[in-house]
Each structure stands twice: as C-alpha cells, then as structure tokens.
Image (cartoon, rainbow, N blue to C red):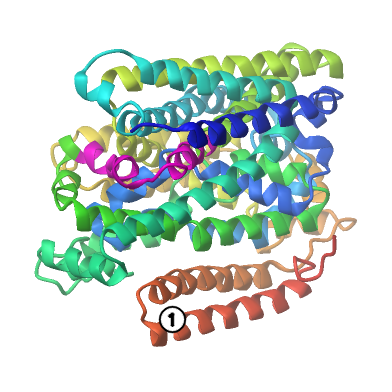
C-alpha cells in the first residue's frame, strides 16, 4: 500500500500532537507523586471517561472483533458484551467506594481491606504479577496486532517477499515515541493524548466502515452476499445466536457460559469485577465521587454502544468480499489470518488520505493502550513495591524519579514480550483467551470483599493460586482439554469459588479494629457488614446498595437494547430500531431518575 504526501502529513501531524502534549504536561506531572499517577486527583469526568474508552480501544480490538464475527457472526461479540452488567455494577456500586478509598492503585486496597503478613505478601505479589507479567502480555499482544496491521498495509509487498524486519523497526519506533510522552508527562499526558487518540480512531473507523460497505455494494448487498456465501449465513446477523438452526454458528452452551458467568467469574484488564487496573486509576484521578461515577458511566456507554458497529460492519464486508475469511476463522491454525482481514481491506480499499488516517487510527489505538499500561505498570512498581517495601520514607522528588524509571522498565518488559510474540507468531485471540482463563474464579472474591466482612487475605490468595492450578489441570485433562474455552473457564471459576470459600471459613477473620477502619473510610453497604456496622456507630453507609443494583440492571438493559437498535437502523429495519431504541431510552431515563437518588450522575454538577 503506497502512501502519498497527504497521508504522510496526517501521520506527521498526529505524532507532533502526541509529543507536544507530553512536553506541555512535563513539569506538572513531575511536581508530585500523586500528579504523576493520578493527575493530582483533579480530572473532570469527561477526560477520565474518554481516557478509559481510548485505552480499551487497542490495535488488536478491531482485528479480534473481525475474527469473532467471522467465526460466530454478530453474536460472537457476546464474549465481551457479557461483561456489561459487571461494568454497570462498577459504575453504580463500586465507583464511589473506590474514590473514597483514595488509593493510587487497586492493589493498594489490599492492605486497606486486609492486615498482617498475608496482606503484605498479597499486595507485593499482585503488584509484581500484574506489573511484570500481565502488563507485559497486554503490551505484547497489542504490539503483535499493530505489526499485523503494518504487514497487511504499508509493508505488504515487503512481507510477501519474505525479507526484512521493517515491522519490528516500525513498532519499536511507535513504542519509543509512546515511551517518551508517557515517561515525561505521567497520567496528565496519557489522559489528554487518549482523548485525541480516541477521536481520531473513531473518525477513521467510521469513515472506513462506510468505504468497506460501499465497496461490497451497500448494506443490503453485504447481507445478501453473506447469506448466500455460507450455510446458515443469515445467522451472522442475529444479535442472539440462532440455537434452533441445524448447524448453529454459536452453540447454546457457549453463549450461556459467557452471559451467566463472565461478568462475575473472570478477571480481565479493563473489565475487572468490582473495578480494577486502569479503570480504578482513572476513578482515583477524578475530582470527587460524582465525577468518578460519571466517568465510569460514560466509559460503559461509549465502550459498548458507540464503538462496536464500525468494526462489525468492516467484518461483515470482509465476509462478503472474501468468503475464505470464515474458513480461516473456523480453523485454529488459520484463525490469525481471519483477524488480518480488517487491515487487508484497508490495503485493498482505502483511498489516498484515508490510508494515512487509518494508519493513524491504529497507531492511536496502539499508543493509547501502551501508554496506559506503561503508567499503570509503573504505578504498581513505584507505589506498591518501591514505596511500600523499599523506601517508605521517600519524598516526592525521589518517587517521581523512580516512577519515570519504572515507566521505562514497563516499556522494556512489554517490548521483550512483543518481540517474543512476533518471533513465534502467537495469535491475538490465544493471548486474550489465556488471560480470561487465568483470571477465571478470582472475580467473585474481588466483588464480595466489598460486601462481606468475613473475607480475609487468604481468601484472595487461595483464589489466585486456585485459579492458576485449576486452569492448568483443566487445560491438560484428556476429558476437558478439548472443551471450548468458555466451558473450561466456567469449570475453573466454579472450582476456585468452592476453594476460596472453604479457605475463608477455615481461617480467622481480619482484626475487628482493622475492619472498622476500612468501614469508616469506605462505608460499604449491605447486610454482609452488619457485625462491623454495629460495632462502628460513628460511620454510616449510604444505604443505596439496592438502588445501585437496580441502576446497574437498567444500565445493562440500555446497552443490550441500544446495540441491536443501532444495527436495525443500519440494516433498515426501522420498526425493530424504534422498539429497541425506544426501550433503551426508557431504561436510560429511569436510570438517570433513580441515579439522582443515589447522588449519582443525574445529581452531580460540573
């Protein structure tokens, strides 16, 4: 794919903006430890929320969605749509408590909630595990995705010829540029560049979706081609899988396992049950509790309702123009080729100008994720390892210096994993499924630690160890190793749940005084805290847990009605669209009215 002057100007302009933002916030980020990792706890909700959305729009996401649509049709997206209820619980139940906790990282909460040597071990281990292992895997797979985009677009001729390592050099350059502005500008630079990157990425994807659908003959032709090309091809457009079909694209068991268990069972970056990772970091960076709630609600609505359809339309266009994409998606050894159909269409269809914009789209998506993972990984290293265990009396100047060094280390670790994934040809979906499986079972304990005083540090330790142990067992047993990943994750989650519940009841609770201190600071709600609440008459929870759960249900309904409603508009099914979108509007209205009684986004100003 040849680039012209206008393409180069678009690309150069984008990189100039990214570096300029980093330089602009350099001094502010370096003024204190809290400024570097939490923007001085002064982010308005719209910046924090957009930053959340941008981070979850990674270079791998459109590719992954393309592969899932090719394999399962539209319903393949339920693997991530199923997290919506957990996300809405974070908005209306957990966001306020996270902001009250005033932590810099989710791992810091461990010693606020638990006490003693087990809590110290758990905090240190999780900080190392997430910062060094999980963080590096995330950077590695998004880098692999970015390399795939380059190989299928500007480097296609060189890749086909089998020579050179231009993709490695280009992604290394992108990592270097991202490293520069992330290291010098901290969370301020990350959040502001995220906003620019998200806007550019969405503009690029929307325009390209229109180009791809037009190239396939229009939206009606796309549907006709897909239905004609494949047996049971009409299933590709079903929001819910067609379980009555003779050959279902998605088995009923896979769908039920995803919808009923994913939101509470699995820990996954960006969709942690109860909140975690960079979502917590941005909630902690907000001005106050109301801004944290608003930011997280904005994130959920944009994440699920606004972003997906441009990617899905490109995937449908790929199926219409290249029927072999579905054949690739159904075979594990060729699944990566199906994921590459998105950049393949860019190479084939994008005109001059849009070529540069699409490269900026993927570079922006890639860099927003990498910058976030760098800053997040550094926050664990600096706050939960260095400050907690090595230099507890370090001043701000020393901590900022260590934070910048830790950011560079996060980048180097991620770069090493990236090189390994590129050298071995690891699939994006394989890494995604590995993280889901490894995190299966820990989600429930992350939720219940807010609601049940009886949980202790050993509950989380046993859940973490059990999740890994059961995953390895289930993955290698002859009876289970060939099961779909969703089934294996449910088995792991169920076994882990039983294990940590048993460990909880067999080990002593946390000291009452420590639980009282946590209760006073965070004010968790619900009957699970009754003994501690009775012993702590000077602290009162909001008493809004029930209303928060109802708001979460209404928010989830809003998402799950808006998604098919937008699809119905696109495909000209206006009666269906009116029903879905009208119902979604009713749910959203009820949600906002009820949220006012929670002191939530409907009641807050600013």
Q: Is 171 located above or below residue 501 in the figure? A: above
Query: How crowded is the residue under tag 1: few (<14 C-alpha within 10 Å), some, or many (20+)?
Result: many
Q: Is residue 538 left or right of residue 494?
A: right
Q: Quadrant of residue 565?
A: bottom left
Q: Compare residues 117 and 386 and report the one nearer the observer.
A: 386
Please state the total of marks drawn on the protein image.
1
Residue 51: percent from left, percent from top: 64, 45
Given the current orientation, which residue lies at the most extreme front position? Answer: 5
Q: State the SS at label 1.
A: helix
Q: Which residues are magenta?
A: 335-364
Residue 442: percent from left, percent from top: 48, 43
Residue 476: percent from left, percent from top: 20, 32
Q: Is residue 413 left or right of residue 376?
A: left
Q: Quadrant of residue 218?
A: bottom left
Q: Is residue 398 left or right of residue 560?
A: right
Q: Is residue 381 covered in magenta?
A: no
Measuring 20% from the left and 54% from the top, which residue is drawn there? Answer: 321
Measuring 38% from the left and 62% from the top, which residue is drawn there? Answer: 259
The N terminus lies in quadrant: top left
Residue 387: percent from left, percent from top: 75, 18
Measuring 84% from the left and 54% from the top, which residue is drawn there? Answer: 536
Measuring 29% from the left and 32% from the top, which residue is drawn there? Answer: 427
By secondary structure, the bulk of the magenta-drawn segment is best described as helix
Q: Is residue 343 left or right of residue 385?
A: left
Residue 399 visible to the viewer:
yes
Q: Compare residues 463 and 455 and report the one nearer the observer.
A: 463
Q: Which residue is mark 1?
A: 577
Residue 120 visible to the viewer:
no
Q: Compare residues 14 and 119 and report the one nearer the observer.
A: 14
């Amino acid at each position: 794919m040849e680039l012209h002057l206008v393409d180069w100007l678009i690309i150069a302009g984008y990189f100039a903006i990214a570096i300029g933002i980093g330089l602009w916030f350099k001094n502010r980020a370096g003024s204190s430890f809290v400024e570097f990792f939490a923007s001085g706890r002064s982010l308005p909700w719209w910046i924090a929320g957009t930053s959340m959305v941008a981070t979850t729009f990674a270079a791998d996401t459109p590719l992954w969605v393309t592969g899932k649509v090719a394999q399962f049709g539209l319903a393949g997206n339920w693997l991530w749509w199923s997290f919506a209820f957990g996300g809405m619980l974070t908005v209306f139940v957990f966001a306020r408590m996270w902001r009250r906790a005033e932590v810099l990282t989710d791992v810091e909460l461990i010693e606020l909630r638990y006490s003693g040597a087990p809590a110290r071990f758990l905090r240190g281990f999780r900080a190392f595990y997430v910062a060094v292992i999980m963080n590096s895997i995330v950077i590695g797979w998004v880098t692999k995705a970015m390399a795939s985009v380059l190989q299928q677009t500007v480097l296609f001729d060189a890749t086909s010829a089998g020579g050179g390592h231009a993709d490695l050099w280009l992604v290394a350059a992108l990592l270097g540029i991202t490293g520069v502005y992330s290291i010098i500008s901290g969370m301020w630079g990350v959040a502001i560049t995220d906003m620019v990157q998200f806007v550019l990425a969405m503009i690029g994807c929307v325009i390209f979706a229109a180009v791809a659908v037009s190239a396939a003959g229009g939206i009606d032709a796309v549907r006709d081609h897909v239905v004609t090309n494949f047996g049971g091809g009409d299933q590709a457009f079903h929001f819910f899988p067609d379980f009555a079909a003779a050959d279902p694209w998605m088995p009923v068991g896979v769908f039920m396992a995803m919808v009923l268990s994913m939101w509470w069972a699995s820990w996954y970056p960006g969709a942690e049950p109860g909140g975690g990772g960079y979502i917590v970091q941005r909630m902690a960076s907000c001005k106050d509790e109301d801004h944290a709630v608003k930011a997280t609600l904005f994130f959920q609505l944009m994440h699920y309702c606004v972003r997906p359809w441009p990617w899905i339309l490109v995937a449908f266009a790929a199926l219409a123009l290249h029927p072999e994409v579905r054949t690739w998606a159904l075979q594990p050894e060729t699944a990566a080729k199906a994921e590459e159909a998105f950049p393949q269409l860019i190479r084939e269809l994008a005109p001059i100008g849009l070529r540069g914009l699409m490269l900026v789209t993927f570079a922006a998506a890639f860099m927003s994720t990498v910058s976030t993972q760098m800053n997040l990984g550094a926050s664990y290293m600096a706050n939960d390892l260095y400050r907690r265990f090595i230099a507890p009396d370090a001043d701000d100047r020393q901590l900022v210096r260590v934070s910048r060094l830790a950011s560079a280390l996060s980048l180097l670790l991620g770069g090493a994993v990236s090189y390994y994934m590129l050298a071995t040809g690891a699939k994006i979906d394989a890494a995604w499924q590995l993280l889901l499986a490894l995190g299966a079972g820990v989600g429930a304990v992350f939720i219940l630690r807010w609601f049940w005083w009886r949980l202790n540090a050993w509950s989380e330790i046993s859940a973490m160890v059990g999740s890994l142990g059961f995953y390895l067992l289930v993955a290698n047993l002859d009876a289970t190793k060939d099961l779909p990943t969703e089934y294996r994750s449910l088995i792991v989650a169920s076994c882990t749940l039983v294990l940590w519940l048993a460990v909880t009841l067999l080990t002593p609770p946390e000291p009452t005084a420590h639980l009282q201190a946590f209760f006073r600071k965070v004010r968790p709600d619900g009957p699970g805290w009754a003994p501690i609440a009775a012993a702590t008459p000077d602290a009162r929870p909001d008493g809004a847990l029930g209303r928060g759960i109802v708001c979460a249900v209404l928010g989830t309904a809003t998402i799950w009605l808006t998604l098919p409603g937008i699809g119905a508009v696109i495909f000209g099914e206006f009666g269906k669209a009116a029903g879905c979108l009208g119902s979604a509007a009713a749910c959203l209205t009820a949600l906002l009215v009820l949220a006012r009684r929670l002191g939530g986004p409907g009641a807050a100003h600013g």
